[in-house]
Image: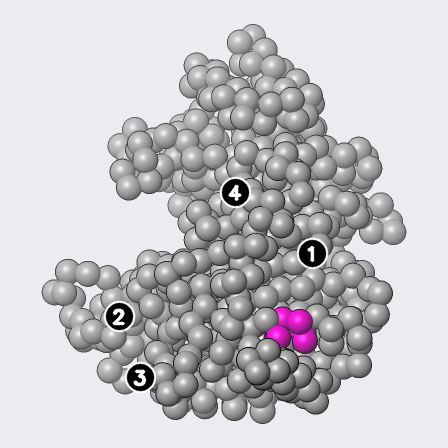
Amino acid sequence: MGSASALEATAAISTMVREAATTENPEILQWVTEVAELTKPDAVVWCDGSQDEWNRITSEMVEAGSLIALNKDLRPGSFLARSHPGDVARVEDRTFICSENEADAGPTNNWCAPAEMKAELMPLFDGSMRGRTMYIVPFSMGPVGGAITQLGIEITDSPYAVLNMRIMTRMGQAALDGITPGSEWVRTVHSVGAPLEAGQADVAWPCNDLKYITHFPETLEVWSYGSGYGGNALLSKKCFALRIASVMGKSEGWMAEHMLLLKLTNTETGKSYHISAAFPSATGKTNLAMLQPTIPGWKVETIGDDIAWLRPGPDGRLRAINPEAGFFGVAPGTGESTNPVAMDTMWGNTIFTNVALTDDGDVWWEGKTDAVPEHLIDWLGDEWTPESGKLAAHPNSRFTVPIQQTPTLADDWFEQDGVPLDAILFGGRRATNVPLVAQSLSWQHGVFMGATISSERTAAAEGTVGELRRDPFAMLPFCGYNMADYWGHWLDMGEKLGEGAPKIFQVNWFRKGADGSFLWPGFGDNSRVLDWIIRRVEGEYEGRQTAIGTLPAQDELNLSGIEQIEDKLDELFAIDAESWLAECNLTDEFFAQFGDKIPSALVAELSDLRARLSA
């Protein structure tokens, strides 16, 4: 009798999927039906990305107590979400690359065999959406139909994820229609892992203590369980756009990178340039993407702040798109004084997560304004005053906002075929050793720069203070395959591009003087460094050759208006050969973990650097 009723339930779920479907693609229908039969939702919704759908889901969530509507006069169309205190960030220790061959995942990823991981996951997903609605979210990464664009579908039981996916991707019917039978697309499944039994009351932020974020590069799948937060739940973001896409790119001849993208126009000549930059977190990516120059003659426009996909174009130049449609930014530290463009972007239609609520129904976080409110409701929902002795917003609290609200958005964001790159920047957070800016001696040397990017640990909680935290290409947590093979792919790309390849630079805004203060003012003054970079690209400036790369020659850096830092230039650009040679030994240790997979070209670059430093 039990098996008969189980068959009836399965048939009912299959009927529910197909009756609501807005596609006739048999591959999509079969896959969605299989996931629905496994997860056993109470209802199925095929998302179309419309405003009506947004209004309906936000209203339902406000009524259920899982969203707070903000003051319509201060922050129209915006909402505050509060997560479970145990679900506040990406969970790297529960993130797995499930390639058939362990060597393909490499030493910097957690690996599990695909069959073994599926055997662990399937019992968890069995009935995981019981009592909930299953949403089918079709999305396009990049303009629908674009040359570098890829398509995917996320199945989720989190309405919060649906709302964020609408902001972060080009989500809806056009993306669904773009997936034709036999074409390549990425399948992603997400469940908060909190099924509701009959009569059981829901909570504001359902999640599970047990979490898995798993990637299957050979079959282009992502399965995420237990977390409703950020990149764990918005599977278009780090999971697809970096981990899966990096593998796709290696096999198809393109690259998925953790990079901002900006357009720089010389207002005197009218000529425009495009720059991508890879910085680890907490090194000012969004600030650079929304830069407001402090020197005349330049205009900066935003194309993206987090992810760039790069592909050689028909003209042989490396072209780039931002595959995303929104910003999922860290709120604390983003403020009127540090990033006014970001603040203007968030005027409305924004989802805030884990920030504080003001008495007049707006939001606040540390760094938003210089003045601190006298009373707030903090991210945990508790009363807060400046005397509370704790932060009002979580350090990883977020804003999700449509990119099209950015006042400095470049029209190039809409470009179907991407923009041609003139320069690529790598940067870490270094108090010592690394100068303000250096150009690589070659593409190969530039790949070596990217491979050895690191930041100094600044707090005891992170390990030994001053110890280097490696984050090659800012991709350490996001590369979907062996990092040594990834470097090899970059070297191959340079050979393919030849003379037309973008120039590569390393920058460091964070060097400190002997007294512990920053030597460079940063923020809008970083435009002075971009000015030098473009003039190097154009061949206007000679620069000066050093053991570690080409640095600005005397008077090449525009210091008009900040002449007071001229006496700091020697410190800003000092190269201590002994410290650099000691760092070469650390690089040896870092490379050693990759064994014989390490590209010989990078071993040669390390040897050449030692020779130049010792000369």
Q: Mark 1 points at which residue?
A: 220
Q: Distance between the residues labelled 3 and 2?
A: 16 Å
Other-residue count near label 4 (Cα within 10 Å), few / some / many at <14 / 14–19 / ≥20: some
Membership of 360 in magenta stretch: no
Are the residues flagged by discs 4 and 3 in contact, CB closer than 8 Å?
Answer: no
Q: State the image quarter where residue 373 is shown.
A: bottom left
Identify the mark at residue 380; answer none if there is no mark.
2
Q: Which residue lies furthest to the left in this view?
A: 387
Q: Which residue lies furthest to the right in this view?
A: 314
Residue nearer the viewer, 448 or 129: 129
Q: Mark 3 points at which residue?
A: 361
Q: Name the residue under label 4.
A: 110
- Mark closest to the chain's N terminus, 3 or 2: 3
Residue 215 in sight here:
yes
Residue type at mark 3: give it. Gly
Q: Where is residue 385? Give x, y as percent.
A: 16, 70
Q: Which residue lies furthest to the front in this view?
A: 1
Q: Where is residue 538? Give x, y as percent.
A: 72, 40
